Image (cartoon, rainbow, N blue to C red):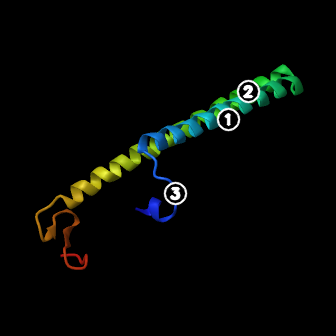
Amino acid sequence: MALQDSGMKSQSIIKRVLHSSSWIGLGALASQGLRLLGNLILTRLLFPEAFGLMALVTVFIVGMKMFSDLASVLGFRKTIEEMIRFFSTRPGRFKSHGVSSCGGLPT
């Protein structure tokens, strides 16, 4: 209803998904193209050893970012599992950590 109230045309969800996906794909393609263009320019500006060092540093930085993303995902999963264990108790009381249901006061 919000779409009709704002005066926008009602489109099918499939058309909207395809339109959005095409913009995401074009953005990714443009990003990779600019990255290639930047690398081609840098190969002309830098001597081979400096370009190789830059490539190694880039690989290291990307690897560290991927590792930190993995660690944060695993940590988030562990937190969710702990929350599920904490809240899956009998009604009226939390078994874990001795916390009562009224106001979060310790029992």
Residue 59 appears left or right of 105: right
Task: Please name the residue that numbered disc 3 is placed on.
Answer: 8
The amino acid type found where label 2 is placed reads Leu
Q: Residue at x 70, y 32 (%)?
A: 57
Q: In the depicted view, which residue is nearer to us: 25 or 46?
A: 25
Q: Residue at x 52, y 61 (%)?
A: 7
Q: Which mark is residue 31?
A: 1
Q: Residue at x 68, y 34 (%)?
A: 30
Q: In the depicted view, which residue is nearer to us: 80 or 6?
A: 6
Residue 80 higher or lower than 97, as above or below: above
Q: Which mark is residue 36?
A: 2
| Picture quadrant of residue 24 | top right
- Tell me the element at label 3: loop
| Quadrant housing the C terminus | bottom left
- Tell me the element at label 2: helix
| Quadrant housing the N terminus | bottom left
Residue 21 appears left or right of 86: right
Q: Residue at x 32, y 52 (%)?
A: 80
